[in-house]
Image (cartoon, rainbow, N blue to C red):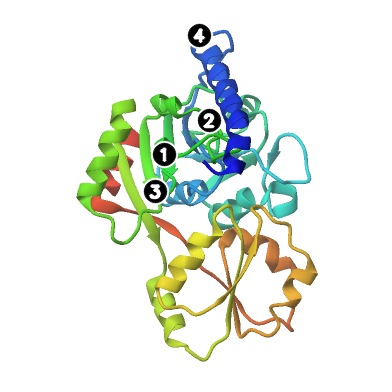
Amino acid sequence: MPSFKLILWPLSLKYQVVVYVRNKLYDWGWLKSVTPKVKTVVVGNLSVGGSGKTPMIEFLLRHWKSSDQLAVLSRGYGRKTKGFRILSERDNAQTAGDEPFQLYSLFKERAIFAVCANRVQAIERLRSVYPLDTILLDDAFQHRKISATKNILLTPYVPIFYEDHYLPLGTLRDHKNQVKRAHLVVVTKCPKTFTSSEATLIEQKIQRRHNVPVFFTCNAYNETFLDELSASKDLRIALITGLANGDRLYNDLIERGVALTFFKKPDHYNYKKKDLEVLRSFDLVLTTTKDYSKLRPMWSDHLPPCKVVEVEHQFLFDRKEAFLGLLEE
C-alpha cells in the first residue's frame, strides 16, 4: 500500500465508524425520522458527487406522469442566500445554487422549485402553499430526518460503491450497508461496451447486500450535434466545466471523435471573467447546462459561441418503463 494510503487509512476508518454510528442511531430510533404527508422521492448516492443526480432529476421531470403536481426540493449548495426559498424569475445561480437554478431554468413550467437546508420544514411549507402530489428531493439520501416514500440510490460504474473506500481514502460519504434503505439502485455512467452478463454480475453483488431492483444507465448525448462537431476538423473547440467528474465527459467526447481542449474546474466552481479570456482564441466553446447557468451572464460578444452539451440517462436493456413503473407504485 503506498505511503499516502497508509496515512489516510486511519482517517478513513474513523469516518466509516462515525457514519455507521450515526445511521444506527436512526435505525434504533434514538434520532427521529419524519414521514411526510405527501409522496417523496429521494435521488441520492453514497459518494461525493459525480453519480448523475441532477440528470436523474431531469429524467424524472421529463417522464413523470403529467397529471401529477410536482415540486423539486434541493439544499441549494453554494448559494449566497439563506433559509427557505421558492425559485422565481428573480433568481440566478448565486441566489439558488447552480444545480437548482439549472433545473428551474429547464423545467419551471413543469414543477415548483425550492431550496432549503431543512428539508422537513421545507416540505411542510411547500405543502401549505401548493396542492402537491409528489416532491422530488435532490441529494437527500443522507438526510435521514426524512423517511421518504421512495429512495433512488445512484452509484457510478466506476467506482461502484462496494469497491470504493470511505473519505478521505475514497469517495464514500455514507456507509455501504445503507444500500438497504434503497428502493431502487441505478448504476450510472456504464461504458458503451457494457454487456448483460456484466450487468448480471453487478446485480448479484448488490443484491447480496440488499434484495433491490437494479438498473443500468449510460450517458446519452445529442449524437447529431456530436457528429457535426467531429466532422468539423478545422474548428478549434474548447470544453469548460466545473463538475465532480468532468474527465468522464471529456473522454466521452474524445471517444466520439471531437477534438477539443479541456479547461477543468472544481465542482460548483464560481467563474470569474479571467477564466473566460483564455477562450477567446477558440471557434466554439462547449459546456454543460449546469455551467452555462453561471457562464451566460458573463458571456460577451468578443467570445466565441457557447453551446451546451446535454447529458441524459439512457436506460440499458430496455428497462426505462420498468423503472418508472416501480416509482409510481
**How far apart are the two marked residues, 2 and 1, measured between alpha carbons?**
13 Å
| Residue 271, percent from left and from top | 74, 62
Mark 4 element type: loop
- Which one is earlier in the sequence, the residue at label 4 or at label 2? 4
Label pair 3/2, CB-CB below 8 angstroms: no
Type of amino acid under label 2: Asp
Which image quadrant for residue 12?
Answer: top right
Q: Earlier in the sequence, mark 2 or mark 1?
A: 1
Q: Are marks 3 and 4 in contact (CB under 8 Å)?
A: no
- Tell me the SS state at disc 1: helix
Q: Which residue is mark 1?
A: 163
Q: Is residue 91 visible?
A: no
Discs 3/4, front: 3
Picture quadrant of residue 21: top right
Q: Which residue is mark 4?
A: 28
For marks 3 and 4 on the same chain, the one whose residue lies earlier in the sequence: 4
Q: Which mark is residue 174?
A: 2
Depth check: give the residue in front, 45 or 105: 45
Tell me the crowding category of disc 4: few under 14, some 14 to 19, or many 20 or more residues within 10 angstroms, Cα based.
few
Nearer-N-terminus badge (3/1): 3
